[in-house]
Amino acid sequence: MAELIDGKKIAQKVLEEVKAELILLHKRNIKPSLTVVLVGNDPASEIYVNSKEKKANELGILSNKIVLTRHTSERELLELIEKLNKEPQVSAILVQFPLPPQIDERRVRDAISPKKDVDGLNSQNIGKLINGDETLAPCTPKGIARLLKEYNVDVEGKNAVVVGRSLLVGKPIANMLLNRNATVSICHSKTYNLIDYTKNADILVVAVGKSHFITADMVRQGAVVIDVGVNRVKTKSLYENALVIKEDVDQAAKITGDVEFDAVSKKAKLITPVPGGVGPMTIAMLMQNTINCAKLANHIRRLS
Ligand code: NAP
């Protein structure tokens, strides 16, 4: 039976480190701040943005939320980013995705000043990551790398397989594993015979967005399995117990990962649960990246 990777516990440890760094920055009269831009009123995005703001406030990081209508043009958004780039009191800028269709997300990512790019998705920061500088690496992959470190997973020379090639998760975590000397395969929807890859993985990272996509037969005995997926599954029995109003049905949805947890955990050596695995690490790393943005703005390499 696999040992559980406790993302909540490690996230708490990261947040304690963030608090300690924050105290040292405040002593130098540096006040890290996070500005979040939300375009439109997508309910899921609103929840994400509010939880980021709440976590920042809890820690004592200044936060500011700017909400624009879903009719905002690309030009208006780029002008706002340009303004925020120039404001010295703004350490970190996060534009919540997805954006309405009239706005090109790549242009927006690349408009954010690389030093304020808290999500680490700007082309310059992706380039730095490939070059081995992970100061502002994307938050979810950064969280995964930290989990592997905390659980003493020896990455060097291992067969690492990443299923999914998004800019947000798959591509950056593959490069971070490569930075740690793993032999990395990246699989995606066009991969033939996926099982031939996953079955040989010492470390398997799954970021697909399909509930229970990875089954036990696809996993090697003793593998380390990192499940990034967050899927809302509305099971029949949960539906039946819910009243027929939308909120109840939504609450009745169960969160599942991309990995068939019960069966795979009998084969794996280490596994992340969903929820409570990668998820809490993402927000903790966002806070760490906010601190890193403030350090970059002030040319600080080490605080202590
Ligand atoms: P995404 O942009 O939709 O990418 C999904 C990837 O899965 C794509 O590369 C796609 O391949 C691949 N894929 C789809 N079907 C496949 C198949 N049958 N076989 C192999 N690969 C397949 O998603 P994402 O943003 O990376 O997110 C993935 C999941 O992680 C989602 O559930 C998301 O909610 C979750 N997530 C969680 C966190 C967290 O903090 N816990 C953070 C980010 C994301 P193609 O490129 O060929 O289309």
Image: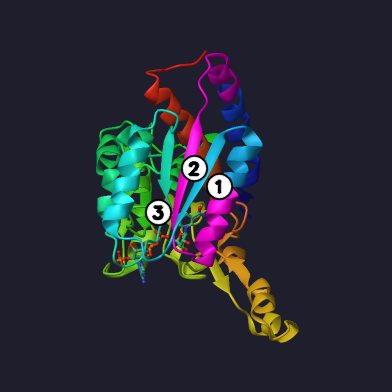
In the image, the residue with mark 2 has its CB under 8 Å from the nearest atom of ligand 1: yes
Residue at 60%, 66% in the rendered image = 255
Query: Where is 225 relative to 60, above or below?
Result: below
Residue 156 horizontal side relative to residue 252, left or right = left
Check disc 2 and give the amino acid type: Gly
Give the residue number, with chain letter if any, for mark 1: 52
Residue 284: percent from the left, percent from the top?
Answer: 55, 40
Find numbered disc 2 in the image and state the secondary structure of the residue it sits on: helix
In the image, the residue with mark 3 has its CB under 8 Å from the nearest atom of ligand 1: no
Start and end of the magenta stretch?
Answer: 22-51
Residue 236: percent from the left, percent from the top?
Answer: 65, 85
Residue at 35%, 46% in the rendered image = 80
Q: Nearer the viewer, residue 174 or 156?
A: 174
In space, the residues marked 1 and 2 are separated at their CA atoms by 15 Å
Q: Which mark is residue 143?
A: 2
Give the residue number, with chain letter if any, for mark 3: 201
Q: Earlier in the sequence, mark 1 or mark 2?
A: 1
In space, the residues marked 3 and 2 are separated at their CA atoms by 20 Å
Residue at 52%, 14% in the rendered image = 28
**Magenta-colored stretch includes residue 48:** yes
Check disc 1 and give the amino acid type: Lys
Query: Where is 138 relative to 67, above or below?
Result: above
Label 3: how many residues lie within 10 Å, few (<14), some (14-19) or many (20+)?
many
